């Protein structure tokens, strides 16, 4: 134990902020209160370059933190009774180790904690822990294993009545330490008084050590931010905020008000007030706000009395466009001598001074006499309903419906009920019928009968949108009804917009209103849903018919379907396999067995000498299928395909061909 323990007893508060101060100067000031103390710096002294604050720290802890800024350890002198220490390792002598009892080689992991913060050499942290009877001092230099090393650590033991020394020998940079901040300072604020300002910098005398007033400058951050330049005066209370534990980087934040009890404007937290040293100010009170110009005047806005503008001099209102005074009750203008209104660019004026004098280039006096008359009925008379136009428009709509019905009938007869063209004509007819009925109702309700051009336009747009919606429903039979409603609405709106764009009689507001009429869009949506329902009904009826045909098939058909030996599911399809219709070992003309043909994705050769067929039992894309000989499939073709002329096949041939190749490859490994 050394005498430096006396420096680690009492906590003190000191501030060191002189513009020119050195580390040795600060160390001397700190140890001045401890008798017989001494600080030795083996190297040259340096300036601190910033503020150092000792707050609730012992002298030893503060000096240790200060020495870390130089990268030096604080080394006590154990050979002296009084507090004496070195900033860094002392300058030792060139010594010999003598007889070495033992030696351990090690790498000090402290290198990884220090290397990122100090300029150190990795080789200096390869150390030797040497045990010897020779007494050496910290800082002595010895030569060991061909390297000149420093005695960086010393341990003394008494073993068996003999004094044994253990030294750590390391390189020159081993003793360097990283910069150490006081983590307790992070987020702390030190209160003081402003003793000087320059630009946006302030000098502070801290309350914890008023003897160290002024010196270093700190950036000032006012509460207003960069809204305005507002620096505090001398004597104003402020606080130095430390954000990262380094007091040299502190920022003076705001001004601490101390006159709240005596200042009317800031006596209550509800009252917000800003005042300058020149008597000017701005007030934000709960029931009042205002701008105070001091002796020149002020503007006040009060909740109860209104707005008041006061001026100790003149009051000038200037505007480039004009000034208008308007009131719900009246405007009063009062002057001690007179009231003048002048026109700057002419000789016109108005003067009120006991009498009213008016002057102008032109003057006129006029009066009017009003005569009242009883009201008379000038409302438009209701005319007769145009039954001829109504009948004409109804015939136009029903004619279009009839044409669509004929087209649908021809499409169903030639292509089937599920064809896209049949669905398109059905949708067109429904769209035309819907618009004809809706417009007829509107004409009867309002009495306004459309022209023939408007009738053709409305039914044409609805038929065209229904045509597209019907085709969409037939192409995508599983589409949701709402999707078909959206399709019909979008197509109809687009057609109306296209028509309106080329109609020069409409303004752009009328064009947009016509194209996106909410009532018409709702009707279009309902029409699209109805088209989807009707198309699905037709398809459902067709499917029921097919099921009835297959259910009532004759005995030959049932025998064909029941000839399979095993039913399996392969890649999503139910398949009835029949091992009796082909021989796996049969060899074709190319020398391939049926198994080899199936491995290549080809159908095997049946007992009739032809390739085995895969038949769709219900003629749907995802329905069950069966293996059948080509001859049997041909002989029973009309029985197996009873949907011919009634409904189109729903089989996706491209998708089926791909599935069939994969099935025969699978079948080559599944013959049982």
Image (cartoon, rainbow, N blue to C red):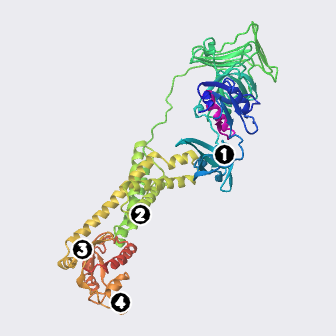
> Which badge, 3 or 4, is on the more N-terminal residue?
3
Q: Which mark is residue 73?
A: none
- Quadrant showing the N terminus: top right
- Few, some or many C-alpha atoms within 10 Å of disc 2 (few <14, some 14-19, many ≥20)? many
Q: Which mark is residue 567?
A: 3
Cα distance, mark 3 to mark 4?
27 Å
Query: Mark 2, mark 3: which one is toward the viewer?
Result: 3
Element under label 2?
A: helix
Q: Which region is colored magenta?
A: 55-77
> Which badge, 2 or 3, is on the more N-terminal residue?
2
From the top left corner, tell me how far across and down residue 356 is, in percent: 75, 10
Q: Which mark is residue 118?
A: 1
> Which residue does the numbered mark 4 point to in the structure image?
592
Cα distance, mark 3 to mark 1?
81 Å
Query: Mark 3, mark 1: which one is toward the viewer?
Result: 1
Is disc 4 in contact with disc 1, using a CB cutoff of under 8 Å? Answer: no
- Quadrant showing the C terminus: bottom left
- Few, some or many C-alpha atoms within 10 Å of disc 4 (few <14, some 14-19, many ≥20)? some
Element under label 3?
A: strand
Q: Is residue 246 visible?
A: no
> Which badge, 1 or 2, is on the more N-terminal residue?
1
Cα distance, mark 2 to mark 4?
47 Å
> Which residue does the numbered mark 2 point to in the structure image?
471
Element under label 1?
A: loop
Query: Mark 2, mark 4: which one is toward the viewer?
Result: 4
> Which badge, 2 or 4, is on the more N-terminal residue?
2
């Amino acid at each position: 134990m050394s005498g430096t323990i006396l420096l680690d007893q009492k906590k003190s508060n000191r501030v060191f902020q002189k513009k020119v101060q050195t580390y040795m100067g600060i160390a001397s000031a700190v140890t001045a209160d401890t008798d017989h103390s001494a600080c030795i710096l083996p190297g040259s002294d340096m300036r601190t370059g910033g503020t150092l604050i000792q707050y609730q720290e012992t002298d030893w802890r503060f000096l240790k933190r200060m020495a870390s800024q130089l990268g030096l350890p604080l080394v006590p002198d154990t050979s002296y009774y009084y507090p004496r220490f070195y900033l860094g390792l002392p300058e030792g002598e060139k010594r010999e180790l003598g007889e070495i009892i033992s030696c351990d080689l090690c790498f000090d992991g402290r290198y990884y904690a220090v290397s990122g913060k100090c300029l150190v050499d990795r080789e200096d942290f390869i150390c030797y822990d040497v045990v010897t009877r020779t007494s050496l001092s910290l800082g002595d230099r010895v030569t060991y294993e061909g390297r000149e090393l420093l005695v960086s650590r010393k341990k003394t033991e008494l073993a068996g009545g003999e004094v044994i020394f253990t030294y750590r020998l390391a390189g020159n940079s081993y003793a360097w330490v990283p910069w150490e901040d006081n983590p307790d300072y992070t987020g702390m604020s030190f209160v003081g008084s402003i003793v000087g300002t320059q630009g946006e910098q302030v000098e502070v005398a801290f309350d914890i050590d008023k003897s160290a007033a002024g010196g270093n400058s700190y950036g000032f951050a006012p509460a207003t931010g960069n809204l305005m330049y507002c620096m505090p005066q001398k004597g104003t209370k402020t606080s130095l905020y430390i954000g990262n534990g380094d007091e040299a980087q502190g920022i003076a934040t705001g001004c601490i008000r101390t006159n709240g009890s005596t200042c009317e404007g800031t006596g209550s937290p509800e009252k917000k007030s800003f005042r300058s040293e020149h008597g000017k100010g701005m007030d934000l009170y709960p029931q009042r706000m205002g701008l105070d110009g001091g002796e020149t005047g002020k503007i006040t806005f009060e909740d109860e009395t209104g707005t008041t503008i006061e001026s100790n001099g003149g009051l000038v209102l200037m505007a480039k466009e004009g000034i208008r005074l308007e009131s719900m009750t009246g405007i009063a203008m009062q002057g001690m001598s007179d009231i003048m209104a002048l026109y700057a660019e002419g000789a016109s004026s108005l003067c009120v001074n006991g009498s009213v004098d008016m002057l102008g280039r032109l003057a006129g006096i006029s009066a009017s006499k009003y005569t009242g008359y009883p009201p008379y009925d000038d409302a438009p008379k209701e005319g007769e309903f145009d039954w001829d136009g109504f009948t004409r428009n109804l015939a136009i709509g029903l004619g279009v419906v009839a044409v669509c019905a004929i087209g649908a009938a021809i499409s169903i007869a030639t292509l089937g009920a599920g064809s896209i063209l049949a669905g398109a004509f059905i949708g067109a007819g429904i769209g035309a019928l819907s618009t004809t009925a809706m417009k007829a109702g509107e004409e009867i309700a309002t009495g306004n009968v459309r022209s023939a051009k408007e009738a053709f336009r409305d039914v044409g747009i609805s038929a065209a949108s229904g045509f597209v919606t019907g085709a969409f429903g037939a192409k995508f039979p599983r589409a949701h009804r709402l999707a078909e409603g959206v399709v019909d609405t979008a197509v109809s709106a687009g057609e109306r917009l296209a028509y309106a764009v080329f109609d020069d009689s409409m303004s752009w507001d009328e064009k947009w209103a016509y194209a996106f009429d909410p009532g018409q869009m709702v009707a279009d949506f309902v029409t699209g849903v109805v088209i989807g329902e009707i198309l699905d009904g037709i398809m459902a009826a067709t499917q029921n018919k097919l099921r009835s045909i297959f259910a009532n098939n004759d005995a030959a058909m049932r025998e064909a379907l029941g000839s399979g030996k095993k039913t399996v599911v392969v890649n999503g399809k139910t398949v009835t396999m029949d091992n009796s219709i082909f021989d796996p070992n049969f060899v074709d003309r190319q020398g391939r067995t049926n198994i080899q043909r199936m491995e290549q994705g080809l159908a095997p050769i049946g007992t009739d000498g032809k390739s085995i067929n895969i038949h769709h039992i219900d003629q749907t894309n995802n329905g069950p299928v069966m293996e059948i000989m080509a001859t049997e499939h041909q002989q029973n073709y009309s029985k197996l395909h009873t949907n011919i002329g009634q409904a189109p096949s729903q089989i996706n041939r491209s998708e089926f061909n791909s599935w069939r190749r994969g099935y025969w490859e699978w079948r080559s490994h599944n013959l049982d």
